[in-house]
Amino acid sequence: MKKLLAFLLSLCMVSAFAIPTFADANSDYIAAVKAYQAQVAAKEAAYTAAVQAAAKQAQAKADAECLAVIAAGKAAQAKADADVAAVIAAGQATQAAADQREAAYAAAVGAYQQQIAAKEAAYAAAVKAYQQQIAAKEAAYTAAVMAAAKQAQAKADADVAAVLAAAKAAQAKADADVAAVAAAGVAAQAAADQREAAYAAAVKNYQAQIAAKEAAYIAAVLGR
C-alpha cells in the first residue's frame, strides 16, 4: 500500500513539472514562428516597393522618350512648312518678274506699232505668236513650281508620319516594358504568398502533432 501511494505521488509530481515545461516550449516556438513571419512580411514589403519604384522609373523614361520624339516631329514639320513656303515665294517672285517683263515688252510693241504702221499687221501676228510662246513657257514654269511644292509637301507629310509612327512604337514598347515589370511583381508576390501559406500550414501541422503528442503523453501518464 505504501509503495502504491509513493508511486502515485511521484507520478503526480512528474505530471506537474512536465506540463509547464511543454507549455513553455510551445510558447517559445510560437514566438519564434511569429518573428520569422514578421521578417518574411518585411522582406516581401521591401521587394514590392522595389518593383513599384522600377515600374515608375520605366514609365518616367518612356514619357521622356515620347516627348523627345514628338518635339523632333514638330521641328521636322516646321522645317517642311518653311521649305514649302520658300518654294511658293520663289514661284511667285518668278511670276511677278515674268509679268513685269511681259508688260514692258507689250509697251515696247505698242510704241513700235505706232512708229511702223506699214508693218503693223505682220509684226502684230509675230508678237501674238511670241506672246503665246511666252505664255506657254510661263504656264509650264508655274506648273513645274507647283509640282515641286506639292512634292515637298508630300515629303514633309511622309517625314511627319514616320516620326509619329516611331513615337507610337516607342510608346507601345514602353507600355509593354512597364506591363512586364508589373507582371513580374505580381508573380513574385503570388509566389511569396504561396510560400507563406505553405509555411503556415506546416507550422500548424507541426503544432497539431505536438499537441497530439502532449495529449497522448498526458493520457498515458494519467492512464498509468
Image (cartoon, helix red, strand yellow):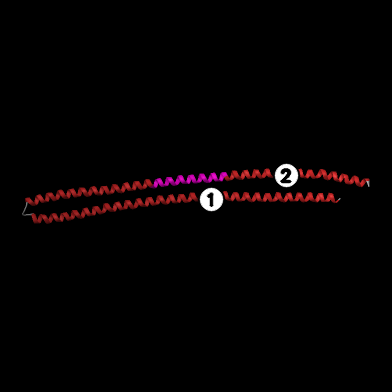
Q: Nearer the viewer, mark 1 or mark 2?
A: 2
Q: Helix or strand or loop: what does disc 2 sit on? A: helix
The CA span between labels 1 and 2 is 40 Å
Q: Quadrant of residue 39?
A: top right
Q: Which mark is residue 167?
A: none
Q: Quadrant of residue 49?
A: top right
- Coordinates of residue 175 in the picture (x, y in percent): 49, 50
Q: Give the mark nearer the N terminus: 1 vs 2.
A: 2
> Label 2, on which residue?
29
Is 54 one of the magenta-colored residues?
yes
Q: Quadrant of residue 13?
A: top right
Q: Residue at x 30, y 53 (%)?
A: 150
> Label 1, on which residue?
180
Which residue is nearer to you in this view: 126 or 201? 201
Residue 151 falls left or right of residue 167: left
Q: Helix or strand or loop: what does disc 1 sit on? A: helix
Q: Amino acid at mark 1?
A: Ala
Residue 97 falls left or right of residue 171: left
- Coordinates of residue 136 in the picture (x, y in percent): 20, 55
Q: Residue at x 19, y 54 (%)?
A: 135
Residue 150 falls left or right of residue 129: right
Is 58 one of the magenta-colored residues?
yes
Disc 1 residue crowd, few under 14, some 14–19, many 20+, Cα 10 Å: few
Q: Amino acid at mark 2?
A: Tyr
Residue 107 falls left or right of residue 212: left
Where are the magenta residues, as a range? 49-73
Q: Residue at x 45, y 51 (%)?
A: 169
Disc 2 residue crowd, few under 14, some 14–19, many 20+, Cα 10 Å: some
